[in-house]
C-alpha cells in the first residue's frame, strides 16, 4: 500500500509540474481556433466536406460496434494486427468528431477504448510474432507501436477535457507512460532506434513527443526533440539535420521519404502549435518544406519512384495528403502544392487541411512543375545524388532516373549507377523495388520476404553493371555504407539534352565504373532517346553483366538466339542470379545488336555495341522461388566475358505506334542503323550513331578533369570537334 501511494504521489507531482507545458486542449494538432474555423466551414467547400464526412463515417461506424481490444497474436495483416490498427484510426476519428460536433458519444467511445487498452497493456510481454529485432507489444514490431501512439495521442488530446482526473491518471499511468517508455527505452534495441537516424527513429520520437505534449510532460517532449540524453546528439531535431540533404532528399530514398514525411510534418506542426518559438518550419533553411517538394518531384504520373526498398505508392496516400496540407499552410506562397492537393481530392480535417481546401477552391491553380533536376544526397549534399531527367509534359512525358547515392541505410540496395526509364505513362525499364507483401500475413507476416535479400536488393536485380556475378561491396552493408558514388557533372540547362556523369570506384576491388547517360530530344527522333555509356576499367579479366529489365512483350531481335522451350536453367547460383531463369541466349557477328519490345501503344528498342565475345541473354525472375514471392520481370542482359576494360554503349529508343483499337501498327523497327565507339581514351569517349534518314550524331563526353568552362579539341578518324564544357553532341546530315 505504501509503495502504491508513493507511486501515486510521484505521478501526481509529475502531472502537476507539467500541466503548464500544455494548458489548452485540443492543442497539439487540432487547436481550439482550428476547430472553430472547421465548424464554420462545413458545407462551404465540397472537397473538404467530402473528407470530413469520410472521417465522420469512420467514427459513426465505430460507435455501432463492440469495442474489442484483443490479445496480440498476429503479424502484419493478421486479425489482431489489423484490429489494433483500426482501433487507433477509430479513436483518432472519434476524438476529432467530438471536437467538431461537441457530441459526447464520440468522446465516450475514445475513453472506453483507452481504458480497455490501459487494462491490457501492463499485462503484455513482447509480441509473440517476434519477426523483428525491435518487437512491440501490441504489434510485431515497435514501429507499429509508435504509429499507434502517434494517432492515439491526437485522439487523447481531443477528449482530454472530457475525461475526469481519475480516468486520466489511470490511462496515463497504465498506458501512455509505459508505452512511451517501451518505445524509447523498452530494451537496448528500442533505445537505439529511438536515438537512431532512421525512419523508425522518426516515428518513435514523434509519437513520444506528441503524447508528451498531450500530457504536458516536458521530460518526454525534450527527449523526443533532443534524444534520450537531451544533448541534441539524437532526437527529432537531429534527424532533421542528418536524414535530409540540403535539397530535401531523404537518405533512405523516395519511398521511405513518403513514409517518414507523415511523422516529420505532423510532429512539426505539433511543435509549431506548442512551441512556435522553435520556428520549426524554417529550421535548416526550411528543410521540411523542401522535403515535401522533393518528394513530389520524385514521382512519375503521381507514382513514387521505386528506389531502394519500395512498393507501389502514389502521392494520393494519406501521408502525402498530410504533408501537402501542412506544407501549404506553413508556406502559402508555394502555389504549386495546390495542384497536388487538387489531384489528391482529399484533405486532413485540421486547420492545415481547411486552409489548403479553401485555397484550392479560390486560387488560380497552375500545374506543378515536374522538371529535370539533380537531388543531392547526404547531410551536407556531398554524397552523390539522384538525377531526374524529364522531356515533354503531362502524363506522356519521358522520365529517366539515375541513382548515384550513398547506400540508403537499412533500406538501401547494391545498385550504384543504376537507371530506370518511364515513357508514355508507363514504366519501361523498371527498378524492382522491394520483395514484400505489406500486411499480407501469410507472406512472411506482412514483412519483407527473404527474396528481398536474395534478389531485390542484389546488384543483378538493377539496371547497372555486375562484375563476376558479385554484388557491389559483396553485399556487405557495413562496407557499402562507408561510400557513395561520385557525380562528376550534370547539365539540365538545354531542354533538348539532359545529361549526367558519375562514377563508382569502391564497389569492386580493382574495377572502376563510370556511367554517362543523356536524354536527347532531336528532330530526327519521334520521341526522346537515351544515350547510355557505361565504362568499366580493370587490370584483370572479369565477366561484366549489364541488364536492362523491361516491361512489356518482346517483339524482335536482329540476332539469332536459342530459346529454352522444354527445360529452364538458372543464370547462376548466388547473388540474385539463382532467381533468374535463362530463357534464351544469343550472339551476333555484327558490331551492334538490337532488341525490341512493345509496351502500351509504343515500341522500344535497345541498340547496343557488341563484339565477337558479347553474349546476349534473356531472363525472367522466378527461379528458386517456391512461395511465388517474386514478380515475373523480364530482362535483356548484355554480357561481356573475359574482359578487362570495357564500355557498354547503348541507345534506348521509343518509336512507332501500336493501336489495338484501330488495328494500326507503324514504326515497329528502330531507326538507329549503326552505332560505333569511334574513339576512347582516358580523356574522352566519342560515340557515333546513324539513323535511317542518313543523319549522324557524334556524342563526346569527358572522362576526367571535369570543368564546364574548359575548351576541348577532340581528334578522331581524321576529324576533330572543338567544344567548351564536359560534353558535346553534333548532328551531321549526309
Image (spheres, rainbow, N blue to C red):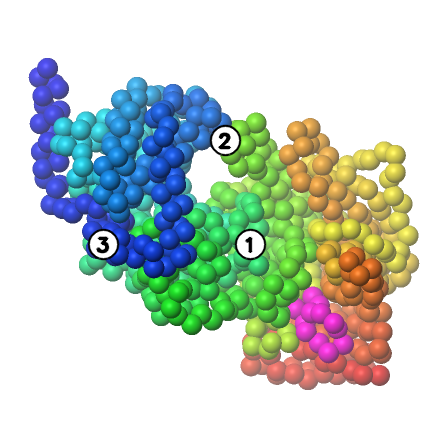
* Region in magenta: 518-531
Q: Residue at x 49, y 67 (%)?
A: 368
Which part of the image, by quadrant, shows the N terminus?
A: top left
Circle 1 Cα neighbour tier, 10 Å, few/some/many (<14 / 14–19 / ≥20)? some
Q: Residue at x 88, y 38 (%)?
A: 565
Q: Residue at x 59, y 33 (%)?
A: 450
Q: Tell which of 251 and 716 is nearer to you.
A: 251
- Whether residue 481 is situated above or below residue 722 in the rendered picture: above
- Residue 78 visible within the image: yes
- Magenta stretch: includes residue 519: yes
Determine the secondary structure under disc 1. Answer: strand
Q: Disc 3 marks which residue? A: 36
Query: Marks 1 and 2: CB-CB under 8 Å?
Result: no
> Which numbered tag is attached to residue 190?
none
Distance (Cα) linking label 1 and label 3? 36 Å
> Which numbered tag is attached to residue 303?
1
Distance (Cα) linking label 2 and label 3? 38 Å
Q: Tell which of 447 and 229 is nearer to you.
A: 447
Distance (Cα) linking label 1 and label 2? 23 Å
Amino acid at each position: 500500500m505504501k509503495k502504491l501511494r508513493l507511486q501515486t504521489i510521484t505521478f501526481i507531482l509529475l502531472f502537476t509540474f507539467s500541466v503548464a507545458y500544455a494548458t489548452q486542449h485540443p492543442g497539439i494538432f487540432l487547436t481550439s481556433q482550428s476547430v472553430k474555423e472547421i465548424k464554420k466551414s462545413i458545407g462551404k467547400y465540397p472537397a473538404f466536406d467530402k473528407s470530413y464526412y469520410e472521417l465522420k463515417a469512420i467514427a459513426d461506424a465505430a460507435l455501432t460496434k463492440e469495442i474489442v481490444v484483443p490479445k496480440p497474436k498476429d503479424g502484419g495483416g493478421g486479425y489482431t494486427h489489423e484490429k489494433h490498427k483500426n482501433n487507433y484510426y477509430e479513436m483518432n476519428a472519434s476524438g476529432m468528431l467530438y471536437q467538431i460536433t461537441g457530441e459526447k458519444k464520440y468522446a465516450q467511445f475514445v475513453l472506453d477504448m483507452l481504458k480497455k487498452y490501459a487494462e491490457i497493456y501492463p499485462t503484455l510481454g513482447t509480441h509473440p510474432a517476434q519477426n523483428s529485432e525491435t518487437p512491440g507489444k501490441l504489434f510485431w514490431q515497435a514501429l507499429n507501436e509508435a504509429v499507434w501512439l502517434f494517432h492515439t495521442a491526437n485522439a487523447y488530446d481531443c477528449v482530454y477535457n472530457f475525461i475526469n482526473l481519475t480516468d486520466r491518471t489511470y490511462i496515463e499511468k497504465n498506458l501512455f507512460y509505459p508505452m512511451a517508455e517501451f518505445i524509447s527505452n523498452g530494451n537496448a534495441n528500442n533505445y537505439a532506434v529511438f536515438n537512431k537516424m532512421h525512419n523508425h527513429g522518426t516515428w518513435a520520437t514523434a509519437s513520444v513527443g506528441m503524447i508528451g505534449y498531450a500530457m504536458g510532460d516536458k521530460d518526454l517532449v525534450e527527449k523526443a526533440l533532443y534524444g534520450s540524453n537531451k544533448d541534441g546528439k539524437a532526437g527529432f531535431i537531429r534527424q532533421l539535420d542528418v536524414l535530409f540533404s540540403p535539397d530535401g532528399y531523404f537518405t533512405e530514398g523516395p519511398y521511405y521519404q513518403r513514409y517518414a514525411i507523415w511523422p516529420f510534418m505532423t510532429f512539426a506542426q505539433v511543435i509549431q502549435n506548442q512551441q512556435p518559438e522553435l520556428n520549426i518550419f524554417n529550421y535548416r533553411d526550411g528543410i521540411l518544406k523542401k522535403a515535401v517538394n522533393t518528394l513530389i518531384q520524385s514521382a512519375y504520373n503521381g507514382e513514387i519512384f521505386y528506389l531502394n526498398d519500395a512498393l507501389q505508392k502514389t502521392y494520393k496516400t494519406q501521408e502525402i495528403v498530410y504533408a501537402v496540407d501542412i506544407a501549404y499552410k506553413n508556406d502559402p506562397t508555394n502555389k504549386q502544392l495546390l495542384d497536388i492537393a487538387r489531384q489528391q481530392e482529399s484533405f486532413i480535417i485540421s486547420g492545415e487541411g481547411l486552409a489548403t481546401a479553401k485555397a484550392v477552391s479560390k486560387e488560380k491553380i497552375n500545374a506543378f512543375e515536374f522538371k529535370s533536376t539533380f537531388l543531392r544526397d547526404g547531410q551536407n549534399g556531398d554524397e552523390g545524388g539522384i538525377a531526374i531527367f524529364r522531356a515533354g509534359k503531362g502524363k506522356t512525358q519521358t522520365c529517366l532516373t539515375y541513382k548515384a547515392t550513398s547506400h540508403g541505410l537499412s533500406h538501401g540496395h547494391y545498385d550504384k549507377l543504376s537507371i530506370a526509364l518511364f515513357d508514355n505513362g508507363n514504366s519501361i525499364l523498371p527498378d524492382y523495388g522491394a520483395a514484400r507483401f505489406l500486411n499480407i500475413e501469410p507472406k512472411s507476416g506482412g514483412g519483407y520476404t527473404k527474396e528481398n535479400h536474395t534478389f531485390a536488393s542484389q546488384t543483378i536485380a538493377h539496371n547497372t553493371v555486375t562484375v563476376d556475378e558479385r554484388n557491389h561491396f559483396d553485399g556487405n552493408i557495413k562496407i557499402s555504407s562507408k561510400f557513395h558514388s561520385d557525380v562528376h557533372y550534370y547539365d539540365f540547362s538545354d531542354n533538348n539534352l539532359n545529361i549526367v556523369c558519375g562514377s563508382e570506384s569502391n564497389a569492386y576491388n580493382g574495377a572502376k565504373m563510370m556511367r554517362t547517360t543523356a536524354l536527347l530530344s532531336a528532330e530526327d527522333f519521334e520521341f526522346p532517346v537515351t544515350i547510355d555509356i557505361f565504362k568499366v576499367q580493370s587490370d584483370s579479366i572479369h565477366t561484366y553483366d549489364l541488364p536492362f529489365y523491361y516491361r512489356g512483350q518482346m517483339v524482335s531481335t536482329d540476332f539469332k538466339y536459342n530459346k529454352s522451350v522444354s527445360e529452364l536453367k538458372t543464370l547462376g547460383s548466388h547473388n540474385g542470379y539463382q532467381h533468374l531463369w535463362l530463357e534464351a541466349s544469343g550472339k551476333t557477328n555484327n558490331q551492334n545488336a538490337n532488341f525490341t519490345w512493345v509496351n502500351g501503344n509504343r515500341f522500344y528498342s535497345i541498340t547496343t555495341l557488341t563484339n565477337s565475345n558479347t553474349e546476349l541473354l534473356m531472363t525472367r525472375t522466378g527461379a528458386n522461388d517456391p512461395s511465388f514471392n517474386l514478380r515475373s520481370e523480364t530482362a535483356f542482359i548484355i554480357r561481356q566475358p573475359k574482359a578487362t576494360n570495357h564500355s557498354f554503349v547503348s541507345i534506348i529508343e521509343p518509336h512507332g505506334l501500336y493501336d489495338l483499337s484501330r488495328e494500326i501498327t507503324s514504326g515497329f523497327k528502330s531507326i538507329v542503323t549503326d552505332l560505333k565507339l569511334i574513339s576512347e581514351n582516358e580523356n574522352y569517349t566519342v560515340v557515333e550513331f546513324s539513323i535511317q534518314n542518313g543523319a549522324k550524331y557524334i556524342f563526346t563526353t569527358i572522362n576526367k578533369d571535369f570543368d564546364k568552362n574548359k575548351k576541348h579539341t577532340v581528334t578522331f578518324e581524321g576529324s576533330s570537334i572543338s567544344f567548351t564544357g564536359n560534353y558535346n553532341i553534333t548532328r551531321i546530315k549526309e
